[in-house]
Image (cartoon, rainbow, N blue to C red):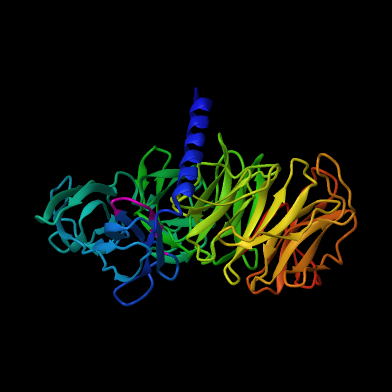
Amino acid sequence: MPHLRTLVSFLSLCLLLACQEDTIDVINFAQIEGQITTEDGSPLAGAQLSTIPATSISLTDSSGGFQLESLPAGEYTLVAEKSGYQEKSLKMVLDPEQVATLAITLMPSAKKHGQLSGILRDAITQSSVTGASLTTKPATTVLLTDAEGAFRLDSLATGTYTLYVEKVGYQPDSVAVAITESKPTNIQLMLTPQVGNATTVPVAPFPAQDAEGQPTELTLAWQLVNSQPDAAIRYDVVLYRADDPAGQTVATNLTDTSFSVSGLEYETTYFWQVTAQDLQGQRTASALWNFRTEPFPETVFLYTQRVEGDYEIFSANAERDRIIRLTHQVGYDAFPQFSPDRQWVAYTSQTFEGPQLFIMDKRGKQNQQITQLPVAGYHNFGSGFCWSPDGGQLLYSHYNKLYRINRDGTNLTLIATASEGKHFKAVDWSGVTHKIVVQVVGSDINQSELYLMNEDGSNSELMVEDLPGRTESPSFSIDGKELLYTHDVSGFEEAAGRQLNAQVFRFKLETKEATLISTDKPEGTNDLRPRFSPNGAYIIFENTSNQPGTEKNIWVMGSDGAERQRLLDQAESPDWG
């Protein structure tokens, strides 16, 4: 009975929302707002605020600001927390309609430390092994054993480590150790001498040991001790990440002393080791080498691209020479949008219940589904959402309802309801004018109107009436005084929604004057999904043939429509952050 449970859950939610609306004029709510900073006064983004008893949860924005709304009067404990910082609790009493403003400082967590020491010996002779290198994962430092084979690491943060030991002429070894604050950890280690010809030991790695800033596609190379290649030698290459002690064998039975790897992650330390095997089957291993990849590039473009039948999200830098795939899921991930601080990406992904709203960080990590009611409606396949100006919330359309939700998935709030027989399809939010623009559509895909309203959903005003041909994709200018949208000026209408000549318009909200921008558009094509660049000087958009099913490309033009340039091929749903 999964569909029945879903229906019951949906009706329960609607009833809950209805009950909240019925009582909103009776209860005089209070709110808590303020800023969280670090000990040096810097804003602390991403800190979580919650109350006891539980009411709602808020995350601080890029300025450290937060707001907890709709709190019934009474006694509360406010809890502020973030990983790496000490939690802070504040007791307070809220009166009806009170707005409590707070300035909170979170201190870094006090780290606990321990000590690791030991002796390294030859497994055959039991003699001390001098000059062996020791490294840890997670990485801390590199040190050598002394003349007695002894080593010592002070001030290690408590936790579990893998200790790697290596020296030319010996088989590398590793051991897991637990560091506690209560007492020092002391271990005895044995290294086994290499068996085989010492001239087959791989040495002279490239990248060099401890190399920094390496590209995510590179060639690993090495030499033999005697520096003379030997076609009879075969090589295996194992690549490790700090969080993957087992590693991955990336090459086997190589005859060459180099191997190219790709798809490495940015800002990541990699360890690698080469094992050589001669004709007699004797194997000798290199030392465990390491390098670190370059910092994550500064990306400014987001878009969707089809990969082996699935739609995935990508980001690119301004020069488009660094293309990064952010999602790796089966299905349909689309309509990415940067948060105002460009640290997060919102997008929709197809689930069993329909397109749900997700967020992830700009590196494609920390994916989180934040909606339970899908971003759906008439001709709406997940595109109907936008960020709030402070990045703490999102607006999204669910059939005839427009909702606001915190970016952590809490505090779902009904903002507006469309008129009978109409659904919301697109939305944008201006932080300058505190206005929302929405596209409202009917069951006929060609029926479309654009409305302007206050950010609380009040005072809805018609801006662009239903015209012959489709009108789509409204978005604000930086100052909130203009809109961009597209309209099929051919006036062509059919049930499938095909457009013949969709062009971009700039619309002045004060005068309701529309200006055509797509003056240099090639005939037989449509300009779609326009958005202003962050500085307002350019417009990014899709262009595609008006023949259904043809590929889309991303273009850019000046804010007046001049200097059209193709930006990205076989890409759609652009955002410029």
Q: Is residue 453 visible?
A: yes
381 is within the stretch colored magenta: no
Task: Report the magenta residues as a range.
Answer: 52-60
> Looking at the picture, how far across and down is residue 200, in whole percent?
39, 50
> Looking at the picture, how far across and down is residue 137, in whole percent?
30, 54
Residue 437 in which image quadrant? bottom right
Q: Is residue 311 left or right of residue 408?
A: right
Quadrant where the C terminus is found in the figure: bottom right
Residue in view at x 16 percent, y 61 percent: 152
> Where 31 sits versus 105, above or below?
above
Q: Is residue 414 left or right of residue 496?
A: left
Task: Farthest residue to the left: give it.
Answer: 183
Depth check: 272 or 331 in front? 331
Depth check: 331 or 20 in front? 20
> Where 269 sits versus 534, above or below?
above
Residue 377 in which image quadrant? top right
Depth check: 572 or 77 in front? 77
Residue in view at x 75 percent, y 54 percent: 449
Q: Is residue 196 left or right of residue 176?
A: right
> Looking at the picture, how far across and down is residue 551, in whole percent?
77, 48
Residue in view at x 37 percent, y 69 percent: 34
Residue in view at x 32 percent, y 60 percent: 82
> Looking at the picture, how far across and down is residue 573, in whole percent?
67, 54
